[in-house]
Amino acid sequence: MASQFKELKASDIEDIAAGTTFRSKVSYNRGAEKSEKELKQSREKHISEQPLTFSNFFQKIQWINTTLILLIPLFCTVFIPYVPLQRKTLIWGTVWYFCTGFGITAGYHRLWSHRAYSARYPLRLLLLFWGSGAGEGSIKWWSNGHRTHHRYTDTDKDPYNAKRGFWFSHMGWMVFVQNPKLKGRTDISDLLTDPMVISQHKYYFYWLAVSAYLFPMAVAGYFWGDWKGGLLYAGVFRLFFIHQATFCVNSLAHWIGDQPFDDRRTPRDHTLTALATFGEGNHNFHHEFPSDYRNALKWYQYDPTKQLIWIMSKFGLAYNLQRFSQNVIEQGMVQQKQKKLDRWRARLNWGVPIDQLPVIEFDDFKEKSKDRDLVVISGIVHDVTDFVENHPGGRILIKSAIGKDSTAVFNGGVYRHSNAAHNLLATMRIAVVRGGCEVEVWKTAHRERTDVDLVESDGKKIHRAGQQPSAVRGHFGAPGA
Ligand SMILES: [Zn+2]
Ligand SMILES: [Zn+2]
């Protein structure tokens, strides 16, 4: 403090006198320096935010991923003419394709990311080995990204954000350097205490080399002498196809298909996606019920991953298979269907809501009927002027009702009109009559309307068949349509 006071200048003393202490002034200055530095850093945009140019192209690419996903298979196409594809190698490559695919879907995805079931050690080890051969990073890294995807679906923090386009969600997120500022956080504490997961993460490169390349090569080489073909077809090209197939869970599954459970976000259900992804096609279902070990609920839908888990459970290798209750699943379906119905009915004309109609006296109605063709049904005035000539029952019948209360006539006194007639009539409403009408009928109609609680923001209401205000049942008992 003594040295600080030695440095005091006249201006500092003035500041002290003015109430700005020396200490706060110093810290304020330090803060200013710091914020200037931070400001400079923040002004420098991350490489992912900078526009693509010739000079920054190399910095924008995630070279390790790109080499694995694109460059190695591209380079290896050179060897195709020199390494003929043997039938046995093709079959083996296909088998290994499915094994490594299941490593991702049954292992990385449903077991480790979602804990949709539990697995005994031998199965976990097998899935770990298979999953490593799919070349999609360690379980820890993959699950962290996937849980983040579920937590922040369709937002900037979603690593495969489908809102950024099909190619970004397919492989752009792997090929280009991503902005660390957008990295969403999620809980993977359960995986951090799993020695198998930690060990695989630590030695991932070895797991990858063995499972993706060396093992498929060794099988083809040892059993039928096709070392080169094993490496090229069951290794390199199989890996290329497995990447493209499993990437479809993030791209195709968020782009094509139906949304039977919730349409507020992008996940969708499609058979094509299921075929490409070993049964991860019902992605709309999956995002709603992520910890369900099933992806397809019906037996005939393609979900071999579910079947594999189920078979493993019969051998005692998988257990604690998670299912959401049928009740909660169907609730989601009903709500989504209702939402679609609501949108549909909102587009239709159900007539001016009765509480928005002007109230007129019965005498006024009679007076106005001299100029326009007006009829009262259930206390509501309808202007049928433009409809008279088109009345299916003929002009004379409808004309005879003009200027009168025709509730009984309309509801069976002369003819029990169809449901469509009630709907059509509702669109011709113009007013409500006060007094002079059949009050009891009016009350009944109102009572029947009370269960109709579907109201649009503009007051529009849906009327179920036979429950229109104009429809009065059981009062007149005449022959129906
Ligand atoms: Zn998704
Ligand atoms: Zn998932």
Image: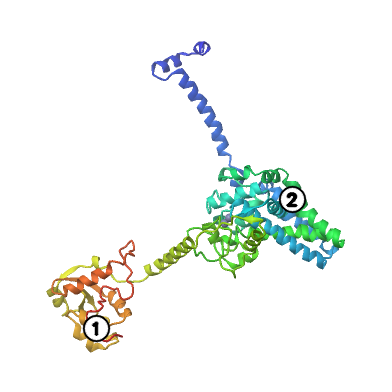
Which x, y percent locates residue 155?
Answer: 52, 51
Amino acid at the residue labelled 1:
Gly
Q: Which residue is mark 1?
A: 477
In this view, which residue lies farthest toward the right? Answer: 225
- Separation of residues labelled 1 and 2 (CA atoms): 81 Å
Q: Residue 386 in the image: x percent, y percent?
A: 27, 81
Q: Residue at x 78, y 51 (%)?
A: 210
Q: Residue at x 51, y 27 (%)?
A: 31
- Amino acid on which the number 2 mark rests in the picture: Leu
Where residue 422 is drawn, which disc sits there?
none
Quadrant into which the C terminus falls: bottom left
For label 2, the residue is 208
Residue 365: give x, y in percent of width and height. Answer: 16, 75
Count neighbours of disc 1 (C-alpha within 10 A) and say few if under 14, some if 14 to 19, many if 20 or more. few
Q: Is residue 88 left or right of residue 329?
A: right
Ligand 2: give its quadrant. Answer: bottom right
